[in-house]
Image: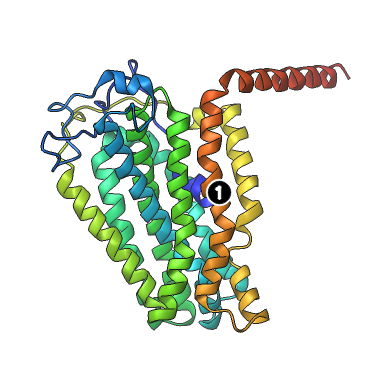
C-alpha cells in the first residue's frame, strides 16, 4: 500500500531562488488579518521571513506557515483515508460479486499505477494548471469518485469489475493532483526544513491510511457496503467546498507558455532511479497483503467482522505513521552524518565499478 503513496506523491517542484516566501508561480497560502479567510492572495499578505528561516516549529513558525501546514495535512489525511477504507471489507465483497483474487489485486493496484504515471506530469505542469485549481479540483473530484464507488453494490460480474477500475483510476488522478499541489505549496512555505515538514506530512498520510480501514469496517458493519463511501466521500466534498471558499483566485501568471525541464531527463537521473526503485521494493513488502489478508482472515476466522479487520490493518499501519516524522527529523538534523555515509557508499560503488572495469 505504500507504493500507492509513493506513486501519488508526484514530483515536487523546485524551490525559488530566495526560498523566503510562499509567493510563487505554484500559488500561495496566507492568513488574513481577521482569520476568516485563511488562504489568501500573496499580493495582500506577505510572509514573515524570519519564520521561514527558522524552519518548522509550532513556537517559531508564523501563523501563515502553521495554517498552511494544517490545511495540506488535513487534505492528505482525508484523501488517503478514502483510499484505504476498502481494505477491511472490499476484497471479500468483490470475490462474492464475481471478481477473481488476481482481479481484486489489480483493482487495488490500479490506484498506484495511475498515480505513478500521473504524478510526474502533474508536477511538471503545475505552473500551467495552478496550485489552487489542482488542490481544490483534485479534492472535489476524489469526493465524487468515492461517493460513486459506494453505488457499485448494485452491480455484478463484469460491470462491477469495469466500473471498479474506472472509478478507482479517476480517483487516483484526483488524489495525485491534490497531493502534488499540496507538496508544492509546503515546499515554498518551509524552504529550509523540507525534509522535516515532509516527514510530518507523511504522518498525516500514514494516519489517513491507518484510520481508513477501521472507519470503513465500522461503517460497513453499521450500514453495509455503501455507507463508508458515502460518509468519506461526503467529507471530501465538504472539505473541497470549504477550500474553494477560503482560497482566493491566484494571480494569472500563465499568460505565456512557461518553459520547464524535461521529464525524461529527470527520470534518467541515477538518484531518481535509485530512490524510486527503493520505494517500490520497500512498499511492496507490505502492500501485497492488501488484497489477500481480509479474505483469508474472513475464511479462517468466521467470527471476525469488518470492524475487526479494520483494527488489524490499524495496528499494521500505525508503525508507519509513528516513524515517518522521526526519519524526517533525522534527515534534517543529522545531515553531516548522512553525507558521510553517502560519500562512503559512493566511494565503495566507485571502487567496485573500477575493479569490474579492470577485470
- Residue 106 visible somewhere in the drawing: yes
Front residue of 356 and 215: 215
Q: Residue at point 61% right, 27% down? A: 270
> Which residue has dot 1 on it?
320
Q: Position of residue 255 (x, y in %)?
A: 18, 29
Q: Quadrant of the N terminus?
A: bottom right
Q: Residue at point 26% right, 26% down? A: 24
Question: Furthest residue to the front?
Answer: 59
Q: Quadrant of residue 35?
A: top left
| On screen, residue 50 above or below 161 | above
Circle 1 packing at 10 Å, graded few (<14), some (14-19), many (20+), is some
Tell whether 81 sits left or right of 107: left
Tell whether 214 sits left or right of 76: right
Front residue of 54 and 143: 54
Q: Residue at point 62% right, 84% down? A: 302
Q: Quadrant of residue 25?
A: top left
- Residue 1 visible somewhere in the drawing: no
Q: Residue at point 53% right, 61% down? A: 314
* SS for dot 1: helix
Q: Position of residue 167 (x, y in %)?
A: 39, 64
Q: Position of residue 19 (x, y in %)?
A: 34, 20
Q: Position of residue 276 (x, y in %)?
A: 58, 38
Amino acid at each position: 500500500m505504500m507504493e500507492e503513496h509513493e506513486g501519488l506523491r508526484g514530483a515536487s517542484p523546485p524551490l525559488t531562488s530566495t526560498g523566503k516566501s510562499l509567493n510563487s508561480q505554484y500559488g500561495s497560502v496566507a492568513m488574513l488579518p481577521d482569520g476568516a479567510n485563511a488562504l489568501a492572495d500573496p499580493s495582500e499578505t506577505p510572509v514573515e521571513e524570519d519564520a521561514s528561516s527558522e524552519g518548522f516549529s509550532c513556537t517559531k513558525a508564523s501563523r501563515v506557515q502553521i495554517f498552511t501546514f494544517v490545511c495540506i495535512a488535513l487534505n492528505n489525511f482525508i484523501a488517503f483515508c478514502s483510499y484505504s477504507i476498502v481494505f477491511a471489507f472490499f476484497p471479500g465483497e468483490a470475490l462474492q460479486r464475481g471478481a477473481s483474487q488476481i482481479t481484486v489485486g489489480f483493482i487495488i493496484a490500479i490506484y498506484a499505477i495511475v498515480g505513478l504515471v500521473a504524478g510526474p506530469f502533474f508536477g511538471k505542469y503545475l505552473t500551467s494548471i495552478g496550485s489552487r485549481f489542482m488542490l481544490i479540483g483534485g479534492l472535489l473530484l476524489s469526493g465524487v469518485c468515492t461517493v460513486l464507488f459506494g453505488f457499485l453494490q448494485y452491480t455484478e460480474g463484469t460491470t462491477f469489475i469495469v466500473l471498479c477500475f474506472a472509478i478507482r483510476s479517476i480517483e487516483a488522478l484526483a488524489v495525485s493532483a491534490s497531493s502534488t499541489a499540496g507538496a508544492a505549496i509546503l515546499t515554498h512555505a518551509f524552504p529550509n526544513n523540507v525534509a522535516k515538514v515532509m516527514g510530518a506530512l507523511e504522518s498525516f498520510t500514514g494516519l489517513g491510511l491507518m484510520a481508513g480501514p477501521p472507519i470503513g469496517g465500522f461503517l460497513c458493519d453499521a450500514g453495509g457496503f455503501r455507507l463508508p463511501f458515502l460518509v468519506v466521500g461526503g467529507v471530501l466534498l465538504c472539505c473541497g467546498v470549504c477550500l474553494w471558499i477560503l482560497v482566493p483566485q491566484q494571480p494569472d501568471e500563465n499568460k505565456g507558455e512557461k518553459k520547464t525541464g524535461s521529464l525524461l531527463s529527470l527520470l534518467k537521473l541515477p538518484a531518481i532511479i535509485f530512490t524510486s526503485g527503493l520505494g517500490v521494493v520497500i512498499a511492496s513488502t507490505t502492500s501485497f497483503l492488501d488484497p489477500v489478508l481480509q479474505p483469508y482472515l474472513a475464511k479462517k476466522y468466521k467470527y471476525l467482522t469488518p470492524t475487526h479487520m479494520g483494527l488489524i490493518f490499524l495496528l499494521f499501519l500505525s508503525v508507519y505513521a509513528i516513524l515517518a516524522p522521526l526519519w524526517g527529523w533525522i534527515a534534517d538534523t543529522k545531515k553531516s552524518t548522512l553525507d558521510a555515509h553517502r560519500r562512503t557508499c559512493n566511494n565503495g560503488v566507485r571502487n567496485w565499478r573500477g575493479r569490474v572495469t579492470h577485470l
